[in-house]
Amino acid sequence: MSAEVIYGKELAADLRENMKKEVFELSKKGITPSLTVVLIGHDPASESYVKGKQKASEEVGVDSNLIKLPDTTTEQELLELITDLNEDGKIHGILVQLPLPNHINEQAVIEAIDPKKDVDGFHPVNIGRMMTGKDTFYPCTPYGIVTMLRSKNITIEGKHVVIVGRSNIVGKPVGQLLLNENATVTYCHSKTKNIKQFTQAADILIVAVGRAHFITGDDMKEGAVVVDVGVNRLDNGKLTGDVDFESALEKASYITPVPRGVGPMTITMLLHNTIKSAKQFNNL
Ligand code: GUN
Protein backbone atom coordinates (compact mmCIF):
# COMPACT_ATOMS: atom_id res chain seq x y z
CA MET A 1 0.00 0.00 0.00
CA SER A 2 1.15 3.54 -0.62
CA ALA A 3 -0.50 6.06 1.66
CA GLU A 4 -2.34 9.18 0.64
CA VAL A 5 -0.46 12.21 1.95
CA ILE A 6 -2.57 14.75 3.86
CA TYR A 7 -1.09 18.16 3.12
CA GLY A 8 -2.07 20.45 5.98
CA LYS A 9 -0.57 23.30 4.05
CA GLU A 10 -3.19 23.02 1.28
CA LEU A 11 -6.08 22.55 3.70
CA ALA A 12 -4.83 25.53 5.74
CA ALA A 13 -4.77 27.68 2.59
CA ASP A 14 -8.39 26.70 1.79
CA LEU A 15 -9.55 27.41 5.34
CA ARG A 16 -7.76 30.78 5.39
CA GLU A 17 -9.42 31.74 2.12
CA ASN A 18 -12.82 31.21 3.80
CA MET A 19 -11.68 33.07 6.92
CA LYS A 20 -10.68 36.02 4.76
CA LYS A 21 -14.25 36.22 3.47
CA GLU A 22 -15.64 35.90 6.99
CA VAL A 23 -13.35 38.65 8.27
CA PHE A 24 -14.44 40.86 5.37
CA GLU A 25 -18.11 40.30 6.32
CA LEU A 26 -17.30 41.16 9.94
CA SER A 27 -15.54 44.35 8.82
CA LYS A 28 -18.84 45.53 7.32
CA LYS A 29 -20.24 45.38 10.85
CA GLY A 30 -17.27 47.37 12.13
CA ILE A 31 -15.61 44.32 13.72
CA THR A 32 -11.91 43.50 13.25
CA PRO A 33 -10.76 40.34 15.05
CA SER A 34 -7.67 41.29 17.03
CA LEU A 35 -4.93 39.05 18.42
CA THR A 36 -2.11 40.08 20.73
CA VAL A 37 0.94 37.84 20.92
CA VAL A 38 3.41 38.25 23.78
CA LEU A 39 6.94 37.00 23.16
CA ILE A 40 9.54 37.02 25.89
CA GLY A 41 13.21 36.62 25.04
CA HIS A 42 14.87 35.42 21.86
CA ASP A 43 14.24 31.68 21.51
CA PRO A 44 14.77 31.10 17.75
CA ALA A 45 11.95 28.53 17.43
CA SER A 46 9.52 30.86 19.25
CA GLU A 47 10.58 33.83 17.10
CA SER A 48 9.96 31.77 13.99
CA TYR A 49 6.49 30.60 15.18
CA VAL A 50 5.52 34.15 16.09
CA LYS A 51 6.59 35.43 12.67
CA GLY A 52 4.37 32.76 11.06
CA LYS A 53 1.44 33.86 13.23
CA GLN A 54 1.90 37.51 12.22
CA LYS A 55 2.07 36.67 8.53
CA ALA A 56 -1.01 34.42 8.58
CA SER A 57 -3.01 36.99 10.56
CA GLU A 58 -2.23 39.68 8.01
CA GLU A 59 -3.22 37.33 5.19
CA VAL A 60 -6.77 36.86 6.50
CA GLY A 61 -7.21 40.40 7.83
CA VAL A 62 -6.93 39.63 11.54
CA ASP A 63 -5.35 42.52 13.38
CA SER A 64 -2.22 41.13 15.03
CA ASN A 65 -0.06 42.94 17.59
CA LEU A 66 3.24 41.59 18.82
CA ILE A 67 4.54 42.64 22.22
CA LYS A 68 8.22 41.71 22.54
CA LEU A 69 9.70 41.80 26.01
CA PRO A 70 13.23 41.15 27.26
CA ASP A 71 13.97 37.89 29.10
CA THR A 72 14.56 39.97 32.24
CA THR A 73 10.79 40.67 32.42
CA THR A 74 9.46 39.69 35.84
CA GLU A 75 6.40 37.51 36.42
CA GLN A 76 4.68 40.49 38.08
CA GLU A 77 5.27 42.67 35.01
CA LEU A 78 3.90 39.99 32.71
CA LEU A 79 0.83 39.43 34.92
CA GLU A 80 0.15 43.19 34.94
CA LEU A 81 0.41 43.30 31.15
CA ILE A 82 -2.08 40.42 30.91
CA THR A 83 -4.49 42.28 33.20
CA ASP A 84 -4.31 45.28 30.85
CA LEU A 85 -4.88 43.08 27.78
CA ASN A 86 -7.82 41.35 29.52
CA GLU A 87 -9.42 44.75 30.10
CA ASP A 88 -8.77 46.12 26.61
CA GLY A 89 -12.11 45.89 24.77
CA LYS A 90 -10.43 46.01 21.34
CA ILE A 91 -8.47 42.77 21.91
CA HIS A 92 -10.22 39.42 21.34
CA GLY A 93 -7.31 36.99 21.65
CA ILE A 94 -4.24 36.84 23.89
CA LEU A 95 -1.41 34.39 23.26
CA VAL A 96 1.69 34.22 25.44
CA GLN A 97 4.29 32.26 23.52
CA LEU A 98 5.64 29.27 25.45
CA PRO A 99 8.10 28.26 26.79
CA LEU A 100 8.66 31.14 29.20
CA PRO A 101 11.96 31.87 30.97
CA ASN A 102 12.47 29.69 34.07
CA HIS A 103 11.86 32.51 36.56
CA ILE A 104 8.27 32.91 35.35
CA ASN A 105 5.58 30.50 36.53
CA GLU A 106 3.94 29.32 33.32
CA GLN A 107 0.76 28.07 35.01
CA ALA A 108 0.22 31.41 36.79
CA VAL A 109 0.46 33.17 33.44
CA ILE A 110 -1.91 30.77 31.68
CA GLU A 111 -4.45 31.16 34.50
CA ALA A 112 -4.19 34.97 34.40
CA ILE A 113 -5.52 35.14 30.84
CA ASP A 114 -9.26 35.77 30.60
CA PRO A 115 -10.70 32.41 29.41
CA LYS A 116 -12.83 34.38 26.93
CA LYS A 117 -9.60 35.59 25.27
CA ASP A 118 -7.64 32.35 25.67
CA VAL A 119 -7.36 31.49 21.97
CA ASP A 120 -4.65 28.91 22.79
CA GLY A 121 -7.23 26.92 24.79
CA PHE A 122 -4.72 26.39 27.63
CA HIS A 123 -6.71 27.93 30.51
CA PRO A 124 -8.08 25.33 32.96
CA VAL A 125 -11.62 26.61 32.33
CA ASN A 126 -11.29 25.91 28.61
CA ILE A 127 -9.55 22.57 29.21
CA GLY A 128 -12.39 21.63 31.56
CA ARG A 129 -14.97 22.60 28.97
CA MET A 130 -13.17 20.53 26.37
CA MET A 131 -13.00 17.55 28.76
CA THR A 132 -16.73 17.70 29.35
CA GLY A 133 -17.44 17.87 25.62
CA LYS A 134 -18.54 21.52 25.53
CA ASP A 135 -17.92 24.06 22.82
CA THR A 136 -14.91 26.23 23.69
CA PHE A 137 -11.51 27.32 22.37
CA TYR A 138 -9.76 24.04 21.58
CA PRO A 139 -5.94 23.92 21.64
CA CYS A 140 -4.75 24.75 18.13
CA THR A 141 -2.56 21.77 17.19
CA PRO A 142 -5.07 19.12 18.40
CA TYR A 143 -7.92 20.99 16.73
CA GLY A 144 -5.84 21.18 13.54
CA ILE A 145 -5.26 17.42 13.63
CA VAL A 146 -8.98 16.65 14.02
CA THR A 147 -9.74 19.08 11.18
CA MET A 148 -7.23 17.27 8.94
CA LEU A 149 -8.84 13.89 9.67
CA ARG A 150 -12.31 15.29 9.00
CA SER A 151 -11.15 16.84 5.70
CA LYS A 152 -10.49 13.32 4.40
CA ASN A 153 -13.70 11.91 5.91
CA ILE A 154 -11.62 9.55 8.04
CA THR A 155 -13.90 7.74 10.49
CA ILE A 156 -12.98 8.46 14.11
CA GLU A 157 -15.88 6.82 15.95
CA GLY A 158 -15.01 3.36 17.20
CA LYS A 159 -11.40 3.60 16.00
CA HIS A 160 -8.43 2.82 18.21
CA VAL A 161 -6.37 6.00 18.45
CA VAL A 162 -2.88 5.57 19.89
CA ILE A 163 -1.04 8.72 20.91
CA VAL A 164 2.70 8.72 21.50
CA GLY A 165 3.51 11.71 23.71
CA ARG A 166 1.46 13.23 26.54
CA SER A 167 2.27 16.94 26.49
CA ASN A 168 -0.31 19.44 27.69
CA ILE A 169 -0.14 21.23 24.32
CA VAL A 170 -0.60 18.25 21.97
CA GLY A 171 -0.79 14.68 23.29
CA LYS A 172 -3.29 15.03 26.12
CA PRO A 173 -5.76 17.37 24.41
CA VAL A 174 -5.76 15.56 21.05
CA GLY A 175 -6.71 12.37 22.90
CA GLN A 176 -9.55 14.21 24.61
CA LEU A 177 -10.88 15.70 21.36
CA LEU A 178 -10.85 12.26 19.70
CA LEU A 179 -12.48 10.66 22.75
CA ASN A 180 -15.20 13.30 22.35
CA GLU A 181 -15.61 11.92 18.81
CA ASN A 182 -16.12 8.40 20.26
CA ALA A 183 -12.65 6.99 19.55
CA THR A 184 -11.00 4.52 21.92
CA VAL A 185 -7.83 6.27 23.06
CA THR A 186 -4.51 4.89 24.33
CA TYR A 187 -1.72 7.18 25.55
CA CYS A 188 1.92 6.06 25.30
CA HIS A 189 4.79 8.01 26.85
CA SER A 190 8.40 7.76 27.95
CA LYS A 191 7.55 5.28 30.73
CA THR A 192 5.42 2.99 28.55
CA LYS A 193 6.85 -0.51 28.28
CA ASN A 194 6.99 -2.11 24.83
CA ILE A 195 5.48 0.86 22.96
CA LYS A 196 5.45 -1.14 19.74
CA GLN A 197 2.66 -3.46 20.96
CA PHE A 198 0.46 -0.36 21.24
CA THR A 199 1.51 1.50 18.10
CA GLN A 200 1.03 -1.66 16.02
CA ALA A 201 -2.56 -1.88 17.29
CA ALA A 202 -3.46 1.69 16.24
CA ASP A 203 -6.05 2.49 13.59
CA ILE A 204 -5.01 6.13 13.98
CA LEU A 205 -1.47 6.76 15.25
CA ILE A 206 -0.53 10.24 16.45
CA VAL A 207 3.12 10.87 17.23
CA ALA A 208 4.25 13.94 19.19
CA VAL A 209 7.49 13.16 21.00
CA GLY A 210 10.04 15.48 19.37
CA ARG A 211 12.46 12.71 18.33
CA ALA A 212 13.38 12.37 14.67
CA HIS A 213 12.10 9.13 13.09
CA PHE A 214 11.08 7.63 16.44
CA ILE A 215 8.36 5.62 14.68
CA THR A 216 8.95 3.60 11.50
CA GLY A 217 6.72 1.57 9.18
CA ASP A 218 7.52 -1.51 11.25
CA ASP A 219 5.85 0.10 14.30
CA MET A 220 2.44 0.44 12.63
CA LYS A 221 -0.20 -1.82 11.21
CA GLU A 222 -1.08 -2.02 7.53
CA GLY A 223 -3.55 0.72 6.62
CA ALA A 224 -3.07 2.88 9.73
CA VAL A 225 -3.72 6.61 9.59
CA VAL A 226 -0.50 8.29 10.74
CA VAL A 227 -0.30 11.86 12.04
CA ASP A 228 3.21 13.22 12.58
CA VAL A 229 3.37 16.22 14.91
CA GLY A 230 7.17 16.24 15.31
CA VAL A 231 9.34 19.08 14.06
CA ASN A 232 12.99 18.11 14.33
CA ARG A 233 15.96 19.77 12.69
CA LEU A 234 18.56 17.39 11.30
CA ASP A 235 22.31 18.12 11.25
CA ASN A 236 21.99 19.01 7.55
CA GLY A 237 19.50 21.77 8.49
CA LYS A 238 16.44 19.96 7.08
CA LEU A 239 13.19 19.65 9.04
CA THR A 240 11.88 16.16 9.67
CA GLY A 241 9.12 14.53 11.68
CA ASP A 242 8.90 11.95 14.47
CA VAL A 243 7.94 9.36 11.84
CA ASP A 244 10.23 7.82 9.23
CA PHE A 245 8.19 8.99 6.26
CA GLU A 246 9.51 6.61 3.60
CA SER A 247 8.84 3.36 5.47
CA ALA A 248 5.54 4.65 6.88
CA LEU A 249 4.32 5.64 3.42
CA GLU A 250 4.41 1.97 2.39
CA LYS A 251 2.40 0.83 5.40
CA ALA A 252 -0.14 3.57 6.14
CA SER A 253 -3.40 4.47 4.39
CA TYR A 254 -2.99 8.19 5.17
CA ILE A 255 0.01 10.08 6.46
CA THR A 256 0.83 13.71 7.25
CA PRO A 257 4.22 14.98 6.06
CA VAL A 258 6.75 17.23 7.84
CA PRO A 259 6.99 20.02 6.80
CA ARG A 260 3.66 21.05 5.16
CA GLY A 261 1.59 18.79 7.43
CA VAL A 262 0.27 19.60 10.89
CA GLY A 263 2.35 22.79 11.35
CA PRO A 264 0.37 25.09 9.03
CA MET A 265 -2.88 23.88 10.61
CA THR A 266 -1.87 25.08 14.10
CA ILE A 267 -1.69 28.72 13.05
CA THR A 268 -4.89 28.37 11.04
CA MET A 269 -6.83 27.14 14.06
CA LEU A 270 -5.41 30.03 16.10
CA LEU A 271 -6.95 32.41 13.56
CA HIS A 272 -10.18 30.41 13.71
CA ASN A 273 -10.25 30.82 17.51
CA THR A 274 -9.50 34.55 17.26
CA ILE A 275 -12.37 35.09 14.80
CA LYS A 276 -14.65 32.97 17.03
CA SER A 277 -13.71 35.15 20.00
CA ALA A 278 -14.41 38.37 18.09
CA LYS A 279 -17.86 37.03 17.16
CA GLN A 280 -18.58 35.96 20.76
CA PHE A 281 -17.61 39.40 22.11
CA ASN A 282 -20.07 40.90 19.64
CA ASN A 283 -22.83 38.38 20.43
CA LEU A 284 -22.70 36.92 16.92
N1 GUN B 1 4.75 27.03 21.96
C1 GUN B 1 4.69 25.97 21.12
N2 GUN B 1 3.42 25.79 20.67
C2 GUN B 1 2.68 26.75 21.24
C3 GUN B 1 1.30 27.10 21.15
O1 GUN B 1 0.47 26.46 20.48
N3 GUN B 1 0.91 28.18 21.90
C4 GUN B 1 1.78 28.89 22.66
N4 GUN B 1 1.30 29.92 23.37
N5 GUN B 1 3.06 28.60 22.76
C5 GUN B 1 3.50 27.54 22.05
Image (cartoon, rainbow, N blue to C red):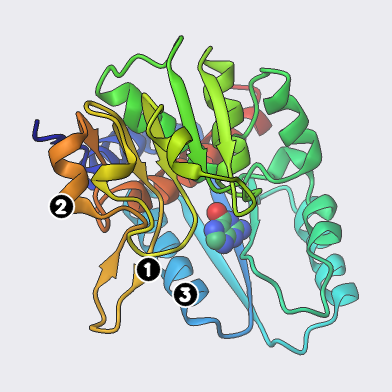
The residue where tag 2 is placed is: 246
Query: Mark 1 Cα within 10 Å, few/some/many (few <14, many 20+)?
Result: some
Residue 222, position in %: x, y?
22, 28
Q: Is residue 126 above or below residue 95?
A: above
* Mark 3: amino acid: Ala
Picture quarter with the C terminus: top right
Quadrant of the picture in which ligand 1 is shown: bottom right
Query: Mark 3 Cα within 10 Å, few/some/many (few <14, many 20+)?
Result: few
Residue 122 appearing in the image = yes
The residue where tag 1 is placed is: 232
Report the front residue among 115 and 169.
169
Q: Are marks 3 and 1 in contact (CB under 8 Å)?
A: no
Say which quarter of the image contains residue 56.
bottom left
Q: Residue at x 66, y 17 (%)?
A: 133
Determine whether, in the image, residue 44 is placed left or right of residue 262.
Answer: right
Q: Nearer the viewer, mark 2 or mark 3?
A: 2
Marking on residue 45: 3
Report the front residue among 117 and 159.
159
* Mark 2: amino acid: Glu
Between discs 3 and 1, the one toward the N terminus: 3
CA gap, disc 2 and disc 3: 26 Å
Q: Is residue 29 above or below residue 208?
A: above
Q: Is residue 74 above or below residue 98?
A: below
Query: Mark 2 Cα within 10 Å, few/some/many (few <14, many 20+)?
Result: few
Residue 27 appearing in the image = no
Residue 229, position in %: x, y?
41, 50
Q: Secondary structure at mark 1?
A: strand
Q: Are marks 2 and 3 in contact (CB under 8 Å)?
A: no
* Mark 1: amino acid: Asn
